[in-house]
Amino acid sequence: MIAKPFQRLTGRAQEIRLSTNDFRILLDQLEKPALITSLTRWNILACNLSFTEFSGFGTDEIFSASIETLIPDLDAEKITDGARQEWTISRKNRTPTRASVAVTFIQQGEKLALLTLENEENKGFSLEPVQAGLINAQISNLESLFNAGMKELAHEILVTSTRILQARYAAFYLQEGRESEPVKISADENLFPAKIPAIEARRLEQIDVWEPGKRVLSEIHRTGRMNNLSAIITLPIKITEIKNGWLVIVLNDLKQIGAKEPLFEPLTAWASSLLQNQQVYLELKASNTRIFEENKQYGQFFENSGDSALILDDQDFIQDCNKNACDFLKYSRVELIGQKAEVIFENSEIKRKLQEKKIHEKRHQDAPAAIFDREGSQKPVAYKFVSLDEEGRKLLILTDLSVQTEALKRLQTVENKAALGEVIADFAHEVRNPMNSFVSGLQVIKKKVANDEFIANTVAQMQDDCTRINDLMESVLSYSRQKVENFKEVDLILLLRRIINQNSMKFKQSNIEALFQSKVSSAVISADQRSLEQAFINLINNAYDAIKQDGGVISVQIDTRGETDEFLVVSISDTGPGIPPEIREKLFEPFVSSKPKGTGLGLAITKRMIEAHQGTIELETFPGGTIFRVILHNTAIQGERA
């Protein structure tokens, strides 16, 4: 891990690291191909533009390669500080070349080495010792970045700059606000004034080089003229939006300016980065202290809360959770922390809410949702988000609604059954008596019109319809009685074909194509024909209602299931829009319907009828269609076994 005073702090204060860009700012000041490598980890940390041009490799290729890929015959054991060695340098799509490489150690602990190349193509290049010293100064000042105050760090910058530029005098000024006067906070000689007027500071917002004979723009220049100084370099140091500094350097000789000028900008960037990082570090340190105190205050409440609580960062990764959350979700604490919340709450309303990225309010109202624990068990919850800070962290609170939901479900079941009992009683009273009158009247009419075949057939059809209505009433009553008694052999193939044929005219008028297929040659079972027929009529009518507006296809298929075909499966599908998700789970409950004018009894009765035959009914729905599957025992197979 390489320390990095250049880079802005983005995390905890202990995690400041030196980036490739920071070294490259300095390396690009060198005209020769140069790179920095770690001889302990055998990788390349940075290189300059001259090296990429010389080798032909891109920076990504260089950083992903080991040093021996670029310098095959490099021997770390034989490398010494200040040595110059002949090595082979690999080049992309070109012949490798021999080059003289100068080695300068810039940190002994990490064994960081600055390698500067010189081959036949770039003879005459030489390494400036001051530039290597500046790179070394970056690392040596890291400790002061963590521990020093502003004055102490400014003094370290001043000392390092004096050494790098071989300066005569140096001073550092700090301006706390744009309108305030810059104040001298560090100097190696009491030469320059204690303050600079704010208006003069505005004239020094760029790198300034003053020498005798030039116009005097500030007290700094005036000091130079009064003391007959050779050259004064003023480097503006940006610290924050309102806080600025100035590093004032006095050179021994005017002739030094030309040699040192290439270092002014990187030195300015280096000093700015150190001071900026110190400010951020101090802010983080203060923030960490504040958070620590707050955590002490709220930690016990968080851990002992009756609800499940999870803290999420700005990217929705789980940072912390209490014991209740682990118990409720059935994950260990280690499994939850660091995991993406969207993964834990897959297929839930909570995931959708997180993906909206609209959790800005300080507190959200409780909202219901269904989540799944680690074992796949569905759990009803009320959830809410509480925004914790401006960084985007939030608290997710889950309240278990299992007990309340189960109690409401039982209450709803009791109420539905009670309501159904009343409906059945009214139905029996209101329908049976008039129906008996219809049947009796039709019998009289049939005798009167016996000679008119057309009318007689019509009356006979009406009698059949009355019988079917009466049977339907009995089926409704059977929902509460759960009795299906008239079992006999029923051929499912003939039964389903007859139902489809009876509805063929209705299908044709609605531009519906009805398809029937049986994958078995015989499908005879023991069943109550009237009850089973009504169940299939309900399902086919349900499919019809789903597509009657726009037309479509209704498919009825008979197949087998099980290793020995012990079950017959009747699938009834349509090409409609599918069933809304909010009613799928309770579709077979009484008084639940997706139709605007539906009674909500059709599928409830159908399910009860199928279950009375020891069968089950399955639902599969999706945008573009719905499939109901009725699974019945294949009594022919069971008879063969008997």
Image: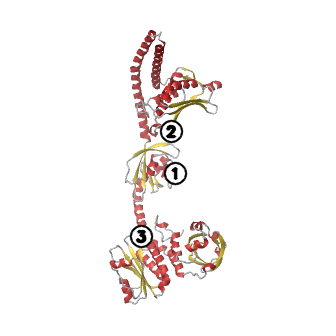
Q: Nearer the viewer, mark 1 or mark 3?
A: 3
Label 1 and label 3: CA atoms lie apart by 39 Å
Marks 3 and 2 sit apart, C-alpha to C-alpha, by: 60 Å
The answer to the question of whether label 2 and label 1 lie on touching residues, with beta carbons closer than 8 A, is: no
Quarter the C terminus occupies: top right
Q: Amino acid at mark 2?
A: Gly
- According to the picture, the residue beneath numbered tag 2 turns out to be 624
Q: Which one is in front, 86 or 79?
A: 86
Residue 86: x, y in percent? 65, 78
Q: Which mark is residue 332?
A: 1
Query: Would residue 18 be visible to someone looking at this image?
Result: no
| First in residue order: circle 1 vs circle 3 | 3
Q: Which residue is rendered at x = 53% and y = 75% of the image?
A: 28
Residue 50: x percent and y percent?
57, 74
Query: What amino acid does circle 3 point to?
Result: Gln
Regarding mark 3 in the picture, which secondary structure is present there?
Answer: helix
Mark number, residue 237: none
In this image, 408 relative to 127: left or right?
Answer: left
Against 136, is 431 above or below? above
Image-based side of 136 in relation to 238, left or right: right
Report how far apart the C-alphas of labels 2 and 1 lie in the structure. 41 Å
State the SS at label 2: loop
* Residue on which the image places disc 3: 279
Residue type, numbered disc 1: Ser
> Foreground: 24 or 31?
31
